[in-house]
């Protein structure tokens, strides 16, 4: 079995570093950008997130089916990294641009540009995710690749968070209040990040190889592929568990800036390696660093006790710590940052496990059906992310509106309590749902090894 070089592991990691830079901008800043920079209402944005993401979620399996039926000299999945990299960067810049229009025009612009952004995101991210199933047939190497992927993903998120606010400030904008230069400053900051993303995707394309070929390269109807997928019990369990995990993360992420601006009432800046950061940005940076630590922990722990057990333990602990967060007062900054660190380690552990488990499900499906539907199965992983993100993002906007939030003004006590709930009890509902689902996941390490051995024997014969 061919060993995967360090260069290729790094190249594979570069792909998710690029995706995660924009994913983190969407999770942390996009709602705030729409409400406090573009001037849209939180409720309108929440509804927009729900409507646009429903379509985007349904689009992922379409991309998966298309990639499974792609056959070029460059491979099935790699060509999409090459041809979609530049459109990805361009539409990202356009999404964070404020049009010269009234409120209705701005809302329509947000619908159009955000929908286009997420379609392009699917066209590059679904093929990228599917690469994990074809770089190597070995389950342990996939664990390592998934850990590299998520380490670089969180590193990309960390970089985006660390440079976003300084770039905005450099151009005369602000994340703490209104500014006449805000629109141009936000667009400039996103442009810098978009250029980095394009370069990283192109390096991923150049350094990664596709090795795993299907036992039988046969074409069947889309109806047959989808019917087989819907009969795949492990796929359903992992899909639902991933949705719960993303709801947990998206509500916490989306409410963070509001928590620090309107509950903590942050005024002071923190100097970190010569850069002045607000407490909210430091909180997010600490979270990304802890995510990376969780990713590093995930592979050795999962190889020792199993993916299912590791995932369950991380989600259970995240739920308990998240609930505890509610009782932390606004002046207790050290406990706030400490809980963020611990919760983020737990979140970092689960995501490489999810991706590696989807690769296992692709093997399970091939053994059952005789066909390898890697793109379709991995598109479902992206779909679960977006379903969770859709529900979490829409809930964040709706909850802010329900709690009486008004942008750029002092919030009532009930609104502040609501914002605190959005960092504690409410996301914990998603994490509890996630670990309950994973209890029923049937693919143990021994069963996966038997599946891999059987598939290898069939390929040789």
Image (cartoon, grey):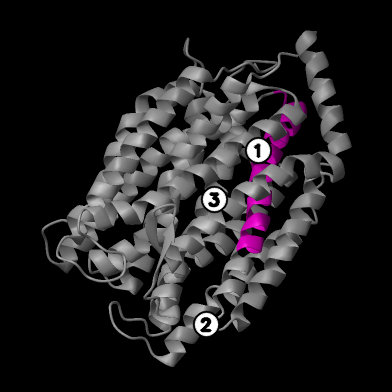
**Camera sees residue 272:** yes
Residue 340, compared with residue 216, is above or below; it is: below
Residue in the picture at 74% in, 52% down: 311
How far, Cα to Cα, is label 3 from label 1? 18 Å
Q: Secondary structure at mark 2?
A: loop
* x then y, percent, for residue 41: 29, 73
Quadrant of the frame with the C terminus: top right
Q: Nearer the viewer, mark 3 or mark 2?
A: 2
Outermost front residue = 274
Task: Pick the residue in front: 412 or 377.
Answer: 412
Q: Which residue is mark 2?
A: 331
Circle 3 Cα neighbour tier, 10 Å, few/some/many (<14 / 14–19 / ≥20): many
Q: Residue furthest bottom?
A: 413
* Figure quadrant of residue 286: bottom right
Read off the magenta span: 341-370
**Which residue is the site of mark 1?**
147
Query: Who is closer to the viewer here, 428 or 28?
Result: 28
Q: Give the quarter of the figure containing the N terminus.
A: top right
Q: In the rendered image, which residue does mark 3 sit on?
A: 385
Tell me the residue at 18%/54% (across/down): 184
Image position of 378 (left or right of 349): left
């Amino acid at each position: 079995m061919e060993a995967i070089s360090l260069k290729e592991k790094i190249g594979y990691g570069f792909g998710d570093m690029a995706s995660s830079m924009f994913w983190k901008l969407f999770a942390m800043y996009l709602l705030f950008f729409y409400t406090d920079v573009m001037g849209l209402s939180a409720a309108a944005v929440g509804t927009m997130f729900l409507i646009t993401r429903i379509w985007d979620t349904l689009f992922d399996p379409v991309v998966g089916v298309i990639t499974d039926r792609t056959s070029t000299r460059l491979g099935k999945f790699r060509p999409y990294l090459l041809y979609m990299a530049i459109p990805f960067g361009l539409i990202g810049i356009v999404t964070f641009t404020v049009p010269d229009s009234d409120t209705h025009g701005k809302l329509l612009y947000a619908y159009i540009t955000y929908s286009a952004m997420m379609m392009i995101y699917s066209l590059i991210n679904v093929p990228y995710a599917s690469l994990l199933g074809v770089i190597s047939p070995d389950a342990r190497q996939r664990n390592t690749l998934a850990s590299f992927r998520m380490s670089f993903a969180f590193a990309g998120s960390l970089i985006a968070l660390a440079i976003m606010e300084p770039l905005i400030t450099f151009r005369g904008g602000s994340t703490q209040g209104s500014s006449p230069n805000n629109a141009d400053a936000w667009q400039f900051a996103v442009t810098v990040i978009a250029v980095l993303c394009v370069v990283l995707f192109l390096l991923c394309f150049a350094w990664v190889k596709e090795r795993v070929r299907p036992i039988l390269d046969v074409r069947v109807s889309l109806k047959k592929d989808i019917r087989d997928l819907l009969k795949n019990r492990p796929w359903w369990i992992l899909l639902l568990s991933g949705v719960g995990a993303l709801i947990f993360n998206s509500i916490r992420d989306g409410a963070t800036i509001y928590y620090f601006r309107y509950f903590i009432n942050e005024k002071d800046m923190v100097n970190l390696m010569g850069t002045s950061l607000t407490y909210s940005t430091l909180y997010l940076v600490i979270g990304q660093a802890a995510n990376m630590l969780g990713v590093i922990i995930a592979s050795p722990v999962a190889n020792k006790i199993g993916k299912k057990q590791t995932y369950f333990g991380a989600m259970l602990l995240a739920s308990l710590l998240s609930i505890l967060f509610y009782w932390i007062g606004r002046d207790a900054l050290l406990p706030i940052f400490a809980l963020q660190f611990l919760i983020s380690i737990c979140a970092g552990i689960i995501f490489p496990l999810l991706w590696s488990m989807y690769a296992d499900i692709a093997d399970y499906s091939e053994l059952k059906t005789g066909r390898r539907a890697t793109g379709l199965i991995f598109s479902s992983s992206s779909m679960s992310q977006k379903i969770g993100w859709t529900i979490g993002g829409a809930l964040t906007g709706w909850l802010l509106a329900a709690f009486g939030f008004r942008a750029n003004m002092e919030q009532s006590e009930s609104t502040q309590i609501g914002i605190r709930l959005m960092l504690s009890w409410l996301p914990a509902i998603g994490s509890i749902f996630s670990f309950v689902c994973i209890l029923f996941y049937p693919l143990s390490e021994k069963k996966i090894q038997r599946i891999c051995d059987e598939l290898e024997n069939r390929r040789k014969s």
